[in-house]
Image: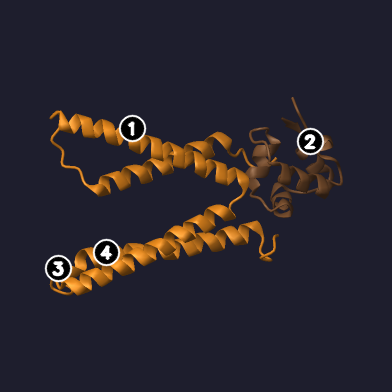
Amino acid sequence: MKNRLKVLRAEHNYTQAKLAELLDVSRQTINAIEKGKFDPSLPLAFKAARLFNLSIEEIFQDE
Amino acid sequence: MNQTGLTFKQRNKQNTLNLAKWTSAWVITLAIASFGPHFLWQEQAIFSVVAILINVVVGIMMILSNKRQLQGMDELQQRMHLNAMAITLGASLVFGLAYSVVQSSGLISFKEDISHLVLFMGLTYLVSLLMMNKQLNDEGEE
């Protein structure tokens, strides 16, 4: 699954640590999602969508 | 932050510290139950029974604390620990039974102990986690 998390994070001027804190996960998880090594669960995807005020599909795309 | 009012990092740290406390307590009570009969209470059975009961109760607290720590992790960490547990369980079963067959056929004469199995499981778990961490990690923040 592809995602725009890194781009969105940069647009909002968040560090990985800050985004991890906002999503209540570890920085390692943010890093793994950004690199496409880990696909988040639906609740975490919803949380990210709410944070950036976007729909899930605008952040995560099926490859 | 969740309903506990703690951040993920704080909650994780608190759970890890809690687990460390119960694990230390369990190790100490196990040592007392093991060495007490000989060095502390001269083989009196009642003291041995009490020491073992205390060890089991503290052990149950350690298990609950471990469960709490796992539940407090995020989904990636939980998945990594689940994989490490699966590898540990499988390796213990496969190598444990293979060793048993080799020993019963008389090919080796090494005297095994339950502590060897515990050591094997601990090392397998640790190596599995380290390898998964290495795979995922962590070329730093970008």
Q: Secondary structure at mark 4?
A: helix
Q: Establish if A58 lies above or below B37.
A: above
Please give the chain letter of the residue carrying mark 4.
Answer: B
| Residue at 13% from the left image edge and 35% from the top image edge | B109
Please give the chain letter of the residue carrying mark 2.
Answer: A
Q: Residues within 10 Å of mark 4 (few under 14, many from 20)?
A: few
Residue B20: percent from left, percent from top: 44, 61
Q: Secondary structure at mark 3?
A: helix
Q: Quadrant of the N terminus of chain A?
A: top right
Q: Which residue is mark 4?
A: B31
Please give the chain letter of the residue carrying mark 1.
Answer: B
| Residue at 26% from the left image edge and 49% from the top image edge | B115
Q: Residues within 10 Å of mark 2 (few under 14, many from 20)?
A: some
Q: Identify the hue of chain B.
A: orange
Q: Which mark is residue A4?
A: 2
Picture quadrant where residue B13 is located: bottom right
Mark with earlier residue (1, 3): 3
Left or right of B76: which side holds B24? left
Q: Which residue is mark 3?
A: B38
Amino acid type indicated by mark 4: Ala
Q: Identify the hue of chain A.
A: brown
Amino acid type indicated by mark 3: His
